[in-house]
Amino acid sequence: MKSIYLSDPALEGDRIRVTDEEHHHLQVSRTVEDEDVEVFDGRGGVWAAQVVSFNKRETVLRVVEFRRVEKRGPELLLGLSLIKSSAFELALEKVVEVGVASIIPVIANRSNAAPPRRSDRWQRVVVEAAKQSKRYHLPSIESVMRFDDVLSIPAVTKIVFAERDGGPLKSALAGAPALFLVGPEGGWTDADMDAARHRGFHPVSLGDGILRAETAAITGAALIRYELEQVL
C-alpha cells in the first residue's frame, strides 16, 4: 500500500485533497481510482483511504478508517559527524529505516564537510525513508551542534563508536534513550575521545576493520536497537 505524508491533513468531511509533491508521487507511481492508500502525519496518525479521483493538480481520497500508531522500540539518538553529502544522506535514510528517533548533525574536530544550504533536503530523505519502512513517527533532525555540546545531551546509554580501543557493545548498554556518536571520515581525535570518556561515554568497537562513517552509523543503529529490544 502506498504511503503519503501530510503533516496536517485537511479533512473535508471524509475527503482529503493531496497536492504538490505527494500528488506528484501518486502520479508517477501510476495510482488508479479505487486504489487503497494510507496517509500519515508523522506523529502516529494514520488514515486508510481510497483514491476517488485525480487530475493534473490534485488527488482526492476518501477516508475509510483512522488509527493511531504508538511509538515502538527503544529511543535511539544518533550524533553523526558531518561527512560528504551523499554519504550523510545514505546514513540518514537507513537509520530512519532502522528506527532512530533523532539525528544530530555534529561538527567534530576533523569534520571536512558543511551542512547543506537547504535543510529541507534532509527532511525529504527522512520522509521518503519513513514511507518506505512504515515508520509512522518521523524522527527529528536537530540543528547542527558542535561535538562538545553533543556530549551534554542526557541519555541513559552513551556510546562513542571508535576504530581503536573500543570495548564490546553489550556491556555499554544501560537502557534507553541511547545516544551514540559516529565520527567523521578522518576519525575522532585523541582529545575527542578523552572528552567523551570524561562525560560518561563508553568507547565501543564495531570490529577489527575500519568502517566508513555511514556504514558505522547504520550498523551501530541496528545493533543497538536489536540488543535493547531483547531487554526492554
Image (cartoon, rainbow, N blue to C red):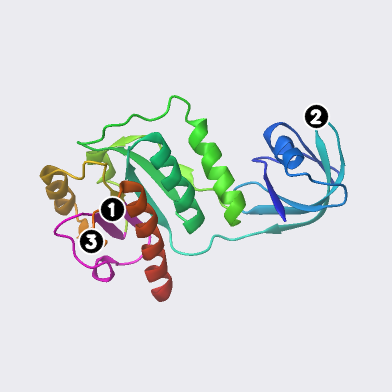
Compared across the picture, whether 209 is left or right of 226 comes to: left
- In space, the residues marked 2 and 3 are separated at their CA atoms by 51 Å
- In space, the residues marked 2 and 1 are separated at their CA atoms by 46 Å
Q: Residue furthest toward the bottom?
A: 231
As for residue 207 lying within the magenta part, the answer is no
- Residue 119 makes an appearance in the image: yes
Q: What residue is shown with label 2?
A: 57
Compared across the picture, whether 136 is left or right of 76 comes to: right
Q: Residue at x 31, y 39 (%)?
A: 106
* Pick the front one: 183 or 68: 183
Q: Residues within 10 Å of mark 1 (few under 14, many from 20)?
A: some
Kind of residue indicated by mark 1: Leu
Region in magenta:
156-180
Q: Earlier in the sequence, mark 3 or mark 1?
A: 3
- In space, the residues marked 3 and 1 are separated at their CA atoms by 10 Å
Compared across the picture, whether 54 is left or right of 131 comes to: right
- Residue 108: image location, x then y, percent: 24, 38
Q: What residue is shown with label 1?
A: 211
- Residue 123: image location, x then y, percent: 52, 38
Kind of residue indicated by mark 2: Arg
Q: What residue is shown with label 3?
A: 205
SS for tag 3? loop
